[in-house]
Every structure is written in structure tokens, then in C-alpha cells.
Image (cartoon, coloured by chain):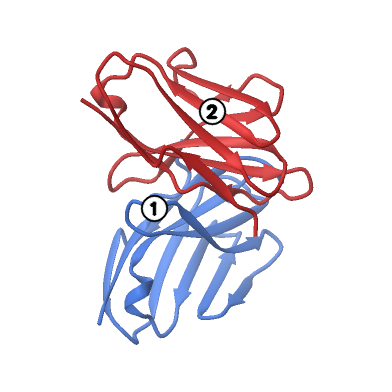
Chain colours: A blue, B red
Amino acid sequence: SQQGEEDPQALSIQEGENATMNCSYKTSINNLQWYRQNSGRGLVHLILIRSNEREKHSGRLRVTLDTSKKSSSLLITASRAADTASYFCATVQNQGGKLIFGQGTELSVKP
Amino acid sequence: GAVVSQHPSWVICKSGTSVKIECRSLDFQATTMFWYRQFPKQSLMLMATSNEGSKATYEQGVEKDKFLINHASLTLSTLTVTSAHPEDSSFYICSASGTFTYEQYFGPGTRLTVT
């Protein structure tokens, strides 16, 4: 069953702008992960943040995690047209356990 | 990084026939494999989890007799959609995790169309 809610469902921005996507979840977690999916393709793992971490960076990506609010955000800075894709958060309750995906945010970056 | 392949990448079949989808881990031993389905514009829904040599664990609402999962080796899992119907048309994605890592590596997906 789906655990995560993501907002916005769709986001359209201009190249160079920042994009922020939010994810909320319901139960306690071991870690939260963000994935990207280009249309009709498989998933690409972007970043994993553990429940005892509050912020993590990877290149132009910045992820925050607030376990008290059961929420996470993904910020993509200086967006590019190639960032156009769907972005999903996924939670893991127990290490090695199954991923439960959020509904996803469809990001469109216009050149 | 770890590579997972799926075959076929797309398949069209007639209603009532069965279709087998393969998921292979190419450069690591996958002790656990996961099968997901994804309808257009929707998220991934976990169908089942399979551990090598064991019976698969199906999520609530997934018919185990319709979606047969076999994980007979550490590099191969198969999903067979039996007596397929048009409503089974979907994007099926597998993922695999290894003995020493809990990270899941995803295959490129298989698009199934049942006519």
C-alpha cells in the first residue's frame, strides 16, 4: 500500500530555477530514498537519507528529513531541461525491508 | 554500480495467454528481488518480495495464482502473468538487493500490453 504523499503532483519551472518537492509518510522509518524516473523507463536512485540524519547533499540535490513531522523535501538547484522526470520518495521501515513509494511529482523544466 | 536487466522490455500478448518476464542481476548475487507494477501516471505498487530458494511473499490484494514468481537462483527471478487480461496491461519493474547491501537496484521495466 502507498505510504507517502507527495506534493506538488506536478511542477513546471524554467531552466535555472530551483525545484522543491515534498514527501510525507505515515509510519516510523529506517531511511527514506528519492528516485527519478524518466517517462517509460526504470528508476534511478538519487539519494538515501537515514532516520538519524537531517540533511544530505549530492551535487545539485539537497534532501531534508524531519522525522517529527514525518516529512522530507528534495531540492534541485539550478534545474536543467534534462531534470524533467517524475520524482518519487520511498520509505523503508526496517533495514533491508521493502520500499513503499509515494505518489510522485512530475517535474517539467522548460528550456 | 550494480546492474539489473529485464527481458523482454516490452511484450504484447492476447487475452488468456501467459507471459513470463525475467529479471536478472548481472554483476551481483541478489538474495532478494522485488516485483512492482506501475499504471500510467501512477506510482509503483509492490506486488511481491522473493528470496532466493523461498516462496514469494505477496502484498495484500495481489493474486499469487495469477502472478507466479520464481526465484530459483541468486541472479534470476521470473514473474509469470497467467491467463492475462487487458487490465493486467501495465509496466512491471523488478528490483534486486544483495547479501551485503540493502540498497535496491532497479531493472529498466517491462511494458506488458494485453489485447
Quadrant in the picture for residue B113? top left
Outermost left residue:
B115
Q: What residue do we see at 34% from left, 85% from top?
A: A17
As helix, strand or loop, the secondary structure at mark 2 comes to: strand
Given residues B106 and A65, the one toward you in this image is B106
Q: Is residue B33 visible?
A: yes
Q: What residue do we see at 42% from left, 16% from top?
A: B66
Identity, as a three-letter code, of the amino acid under mark 1: Arg
Subunit that carries the residue with mark 1: A
Answer yes or no: are tags 1 and 2 on the same subunit.
no
Subunit that carries the residue with mark 2: B
Quadrant in the picture for residue B44? top left
Query: Which disc, if any, is residue A41?
Result: 1
Residue contact at pointers 1 and 2, CB within 8 angstroms: no
Q: Position of residue B83 (x, y in %)?
A: 34, 14
As helix, strand or loop, the secondary structure at mark 1 comes to: loop
Q: Position of residue B32 (x, y in %)?
A: 67, 36
Query: Which disc, if any, is residue B78?
Result: 2
Identity, as a three-letter code, of the amino acid under mark 2: Thr
Q: Position of residue A89 (x, y in %)?
A: 49, 56
Side (left or right) of A18 relative to B113: right
Outermost right residue:
B100
Q: State the CA–CA distance, disc 1 to disc 2.
A: 19 Å
